[in-house]
Image: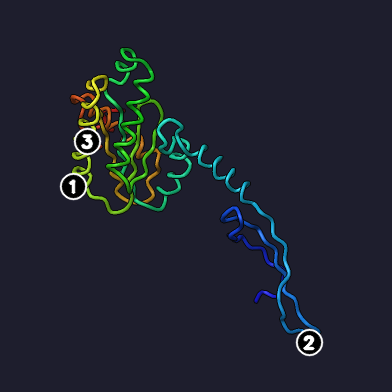
């Protein structure tokens, strides 16, 4: 239809399974100028594309937990925040340093991996990020209400308690959560993360193992 050489990306079933190909196809015409077929050449890029996807995943994913990493959070979600309303739940494990000091870093890593699993089970539609250390962020999109966030966090805290209680070494752990509710689209991600961080420390100072919603009073106190 274009009447010229065109480039395509196609999937073709081969002897070794589905292959990914880049093809160049040119239309052929007879002496009367009528279309009679095509001629082309194809390059198999299956391995190159698999390697590219692997590198991309490594760049975006936390190696230990399998969650998205801090880099992804700042570079990808910042663009999302410009066009969508976001809700940020900033989380930090309570007494995590004590776990590492008393049971070693392997126990700490196991706790982080298990916590990440609970996170994904409770927030399957959200963007779940490990910011580093024992800090995590859950990003919800769209028309999320404060009531629905409270319901989800109540269930999440119960699940976290059950997980930590199931292992003696983890029994002293809990999680403190700060929530920043974006009022509209266009609020910079950095602002929402800061608000969530401030609210999270309010939760810690208020007794830990709880969540707090950000308010302007907290911002004034933070200044």
Which disc number belongs to residue 147? 1
* Disc 2, SS: loop
Task: Report the residue marked by disc 3.
Answer: 159
Image position of 178 (left or right of 36): left
* Disc 1, SS: helix
Residue at the bottom extreme of this rendering:
32
Q: Residue at x 42, y 50 (%)?
A: 82
Residue 174 place in picture, x, y as percent: 24, 26
Dot 1 or dot 2: first in sequence order is 2
Dot 1 or dot 3: first in sequence order is 1
Q: Residue at x 54, y 41 (%)?
A: 54
Q: Residue at x 72, y 62 (%)?
A: 41
The Cα–Cα distance between marks 1 and 2, rounded to whole angstroms, is: 71 Å
Q: Residues within 10 Å of mark 2 (few under 14, many from 20)?
A: few
Dot 3 or dot 2: first in sequence order is 2
Task: Report the residue marked by disc 2.
Answer: 32
The Cα–Cα distance between marks 1 and 3, rounded to whole angstroms, is: 19 Å
Residue 75 place in picture, x, y as percent: 48, 41
Image position of 192 (left or right of 176): right
Of labels 1 and 3, the one closer to you: 3
Of residues 156 and 48, the one drawn nearer to the viewer in this rendering: 48
Camera sees residue 150: yes
Image position of 117 (left or right of 17): left
Q: Total marks drawn?
A: 3
Quadrant of res 173? top left
Residue at the right extreme of this rendering:
31
Of the 4 image quadrants, the one containing the C terminus is top left
Its colouring scheme is rainbow
* Disc 3, SS: helix
């Amino acid at each position: 239809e274009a009447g010229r050489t065109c480039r395509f990306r196609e999937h073709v079933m081969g002897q070794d399974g589905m292959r990914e190909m880049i093809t160049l196809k040119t239309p052929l015409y007879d002496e009367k100028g009528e279309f009679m077929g095509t001629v082309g050449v194809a390059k198999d890029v299956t391995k190159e594309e698999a390697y590219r996807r692997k590198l991309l995943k490594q760049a975006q994913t936390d190696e230990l937990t399998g969650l998205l990493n801090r880099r992804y959070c700042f570079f990808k979600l910042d663009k999302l925040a410009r066009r969508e309303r976001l809700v940020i739940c900033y989380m930090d494990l309570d007494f995590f340093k004590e776990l590492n000091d008393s049971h070693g870093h392997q126990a700490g890593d196991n706790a982080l991996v298990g916590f990440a699993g609970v996170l994904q089970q409770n927030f399957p539609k959200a963007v779940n990020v490990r910011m580093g250390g024992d800090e995590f962020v859950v990003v919800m999109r769209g028309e999320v209400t404060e009531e629905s966030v409270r319901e989800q966090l109540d269930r999440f805290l119960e699940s976290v308690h059950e997980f930590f209680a199931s292992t003696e070494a983890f029994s002293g752990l809990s999680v403190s959560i700060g929530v920043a509710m974006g009022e509209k689209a266009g609020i910079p991600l950095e602002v929402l993360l800061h608000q969530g961080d401030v609210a999270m420390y309010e939760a810690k100072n208020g007794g830990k193992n709880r969540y707090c919603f950000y308010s302007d009073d907290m911002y004034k106190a933070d200044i």
